Amino acid sequence: MKKWRAGLMLLMLLMVPFPAFAGVPLDTVKSNVNGVLDVLRDPKLQGESGKKVKEQRITAAADKLFDFVELSKRTLGLNWNKFTTDQRKEFVELFKTILKDAYVDKITAYTNEQVNFTKEVPLSEATVEVQSGVVAKGGETPIYYRVIKKDNAWKVYDVVIEGVSLISNYRTQFREILGNNPPEQLLQTLRKKVGKG
Amino acid sequence: MRRREPRRDRRGICVIGWTACMVLLLFLFLGLTPLHAASDSPDPNTGAGVDVPAVGKQVEEAGPIPAATAGKPSDEYGNVTEDVGGGEELRIADPIEPWNRAMYHVNDKLYFWLLKPTAKGYKYIVPEDFRGLFSNFYRNLRAPIRIVNNFLQGKPGYAGIELAKFLINSTVGVGGLRDCATECFGINGRDADFGQTLGKYGVGFGFYVVWPLLGPSSPRDTIGWIGDWLLRPQSYVSSEWISPEGVGLYVHEKVNDTSFHIGDFEAIKGAAIDPYVAMRDAYVQYRKKLIEQ
């Protein structure tokens, strides 16, 4: 009778869903980062011919890894509220393009290096920092991914490389522009940067 | 409620049953916590079905919902009610910005016209393994800086480890060419410099300074560099402060180091909207982290 009861307890234990089980953020980031790296390493996509397909695949892989809206909100902070809904959408798209253009080259350089995912540190109830290191001859570069849980998926909203937070870095730059200029001015600067201005 | 029934069994609590019960309750509690947090939210705008993106941050609905966001949470592009960035603001005073911006451009040109081509040529000629050996060699020579500053920062344990590493690498590692302490014995040290020590003692940045050749700094970290410079054995290769040997060694160290980092500065610059501000912020964040850890 006692054994039967223990067995029942165990069964019920297994049935209880626990959404924030440790390890999920790390595994998610790891597999999504590897998703990007796989596209970059794919021998079929090398050279000019595969360039377009490669771009599309990278975009798809990046959308899976990052939450660009959350990332944009946190970068702009309260300045986000000064933007109209349409301006917000345009900002997210432009910022996404800039980050992709800038960092794909950087990530490509890492394709042959070893990437270790070491641990995850809870930051708040819904956010976790997944720590990784890129090992190269010159030493190891720590890269931390800050992830947030939304709709049952963990997505990256900040990347911290060698202690330098991506969103803080852009926030400082945007704040200088938004200090004495309307949001349109920042959008114009970003359009120029991605070559649409 | 059905799940709690076994606990009400009056025929005594066996150890296994009791433990299982506690574990179950614990998981139930943990599993439900986020839901409670969401539903207990005081913000009336955060109703059912609208997820809460972050703790301490509520999102309001922003007027009419455009068709483009259909299928996504309706508040995705809504207002933020708090500054949700990522903690405290990191600012540094920049009273001599015109000078700093000018020096930023000088260093930018020095990098693209001089350092980068030199490092690229060097990288082409010298195999990676050799460059790795030089890298270890210069790192080993900086051991006195790490030993002294770990000690000054109240970490005599790490000072001892760095001393041991220095002794092992200088002997078994053939004059520091190999990092045998790490590779053979798995001994990991801790980086430390004098600017960091001063920061740990409570000395602030002061303000932002960009030095020609040397790059981003502050009065505190400039004093730090001088302190570190005095602890480098290379500084004493000649009786003069500036000698051909000393400068030669410094240039080689710099070129060898740069050969591993070609493209880093380009990436930062390419990604930035205002590269000067981006570099300044990166410097502040990087140094601040070193002092806090």
Image: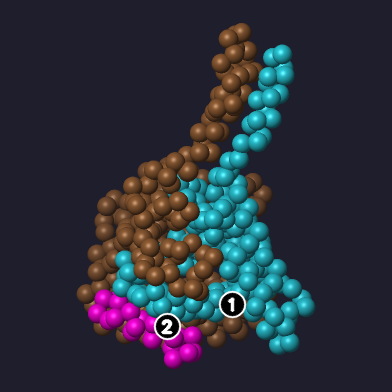
Chain colours: A cyan, B brown
Q: Residue at x 48, y 43 (%)?
A: B35
Expressed as whole percent of the image width and height from the top left, the position of residue A66 reads 54, 65
Query: In what element is the residue under mark 1?
Result: helix
Question: In the rendered image, which residue does mark 1 sit on?
Answer: A105
Magenta span: predominant SS is: helix
Question: How busy is the neighbourhood of tag 2: few (under 14 within 10 Å), some, or many (20 plus)?
Answer: many
Outermost residue on the left side: it is: B95
Can you see residue B180?
Answer: no
Question: How busy is the neighbourhood of tag 1: few (under 14 within 10 Å), some, or many (20 plus)?
Answer: few
Q: Is residue A115 magenta?
A: no
Q: Is residue A188 magenta?
A: yes
Question: In the rendered image, which residue does mark 2 sit on?
Answer: A190
Can you see residue B205?
Answer: yes
Q: Which mark is residue B194?
A: none
Give the quadrant of the N terminus of chain A: top right
Mark 1 or mark 2, which is nearer to you? 2
Magenta stretch, residue numbers: A176-197
B30 to A146, vertically: above or below: above
Q: Nearer the viewer, residue B1 or B215?
A: B1
Q: Residue at x 49, y 73 (%)?
A: B67
Q: What amino acid is labelled 1 in the image? A: Asp
